[in-house]
Image (spheres, grey):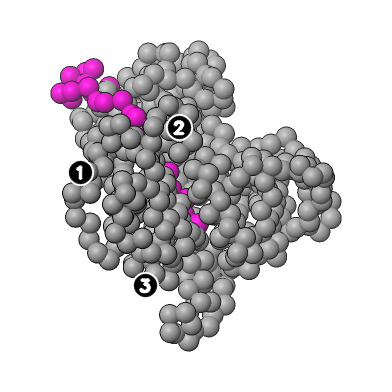
Amino acid sequence: MAYDVVVLGSGPGGYVAAIRASQLGFKTAIIEKEALGGICLNWGCIPTKALLKSAQVFEYIKHSKDYGIEATGTADFSAVIKRSRGVADKMSKGVQFLMKKNKIDVIMGFGKLKAKGQIEVKGTDGKSQIVEAKNIILATGGRSRELPSLKIDGKKIIGYREAMVLPQQPKSMIVVGSGAIGVEFGYFYATLGTKVTIVEFMDRIVPVEDEEISKELAKNFKKNGIEIMTSSEVTSVDTSGNGVKAKVKTKDGEVILEADVVLSAVGVAANIEGIGLEELGVKTEKGKIAVDKYYKTNVPGIYAIGDCVPGQALAHVASKEGIICVENIAYGEKKYNHQPEALDYGNVPGCTYCTPEVASVGMTEKQAKDAGYEIKVGKFPLSAAGKATAAGHNEGFIKVIFDAKYGEWLGTHMIGYNVTEMIAETVVARKLETTYHEVLDSIHPHPTMSENIKEAIEVAYGEAIHI
């Protein structure tokens, strides 16, 4: 079988690249070893949001009196898990539909680079076939990174996949790592009644975020019973008993934590093993496939996108990389009339879906200062926001950072109710090189959460009305 484009992996990078390739007139196929949609749709972004929604509903029920409603309820852990799996299955079937709609051949099996323009695909029946392609895009994604002291056994030391389908709710859990995966699962389990302790190696949780965001999230988590240990490292885990005993090195000495289970959430490792990179001489660096700004590897005709290349390991990044990659291939073959613009990794939004939510894009206050900018910072507390107060979620704030000299929007950092739905305003404004006064001259609807971005900008420029 010969194709113009073959994509190895069907996650949000792979399937989006395949669809764009088909739209541009390429004969396209996609190879997938497990389920269409990859980790994102089956074990990541989508089903975790279903779990988090169940936790939020349960939280509403527990606090229903605050809204003038008498309601009681218990969380059925197995039913919560079942709903999440149903959402994931529905979305995966949606990708199957998109493949048919776009006339993309789906080849199930494990793909491996065989020779120039060839991929060997081994099916679950053990039989192999050779798929030929003029252009091969590697979109093999990532998996839970393992620490030497924290080997995942799938039972007592688990990764995110196991955390989504545990047969029963643990009474206690140690979460190692406080990035998005760690704090989302920490919030989910704690809300359902599990005693959660988060252990973070850095000196604050969600360490990639602005420092004030980290402090606010830690304050909210502690208020809701989540224990947080920063500047701490799990050095070993004893799984010989009924539960686990984790040895934790802290700045004040060593402590032993006991729990039913440990969740390892220390990052993502690229899936680059066993796919034929070495045989074809595809260059890798620090566990990732090396690519240029159009995702070309050092081997002609082979490209790579998503979690297996350097850059943020985010679904929306993988999707955009896939589109840029395919459009550049099409441009080179005169199937597309202009060369795509390279992705600006400095304008990639990040979202964390615990409660309160966290969303950010651009520079933190420290990064802006370290870069030599003279800055104006505005912070608007959601306690002063009408929509947040009406919703019963007035914790958190919106923080904006501008260059004092030219009015350039350097960054936005939010924590609070529904803020992940609001960050795109900053992304688009920064892309359009909007300045502060143009945003202030734009009407934001009231009462909404989005108007608080404008309120924060007013604070930065000494024009605050509502605080």
Chief secondary structure of the magenta portion: loop
Check if residue 154 falls in the magenta segment.
Answer: no
Q: Which residues are magenta?
A: 329-354
Q: CA distance from mark 3 to mark 1?
A: 29 Å
Looking at the rendering, which quadrant does residue 21 occupy? top left
Q: Quick one: quadrant of the N terminus? A: top left
* Left or right of 153, for residue 332: left
* Left or right of 62, for residue 157: right
Decide which of tag 3 and tag 2 comes sooner along the chain: 2
Tell me if I can see residue 431 in this picture: no
The residue carrying pointer 1 sits among few (fewer than 14), some (14 to 19) or many (20 or more) residues within 10 Å by Cα, namely few
* Left or right of 87, for residue 199: right
Looking at numbered disc 1 in the image, what kind of residue is underneath it? Glu
Instruction: Write the residue at 63% across / 68% down.
Output: 193
Instruction: Write the residue at 39% across / 55% down.
Output: 380
Looking at numbered disc 3 in the image, what kind of residue is underneath it? Ala
Question: Residue 438, labelled with which disc?
Answer: 1
- Which percent across, then down, holds residue 162? 61, 52
Question: Which residue is identified by label 2?
Answer: 369
Looking at numbered disc 2 in the image, what kind of residue is underneath it? Lys
The residue carrying pointer 2 sits among few (fewer than 14), some (14 to 19) or many (20 or more) residues within 10 Å by Cα, namely few
Q: CA distance from mark 1 to mark 2?
A: 24 Å
Question: Which residue is identified by label 3?
Answer: 390
The answer to whether residue 389 is above or below residue 107 is below
- Which percent across, then down, holds residue 443? 19, 55
Decide which of tag 3 and tag 1 comes sooner along the chain: 3
Which of these two is toward me, 334 or 199? 199
Q: Secondary structure at mark 2?
A: helix
The answer to whether residue 36 is above or below residue 290 is below
Instruction: Write the residue at 24% across / 38% down.
Output: 435
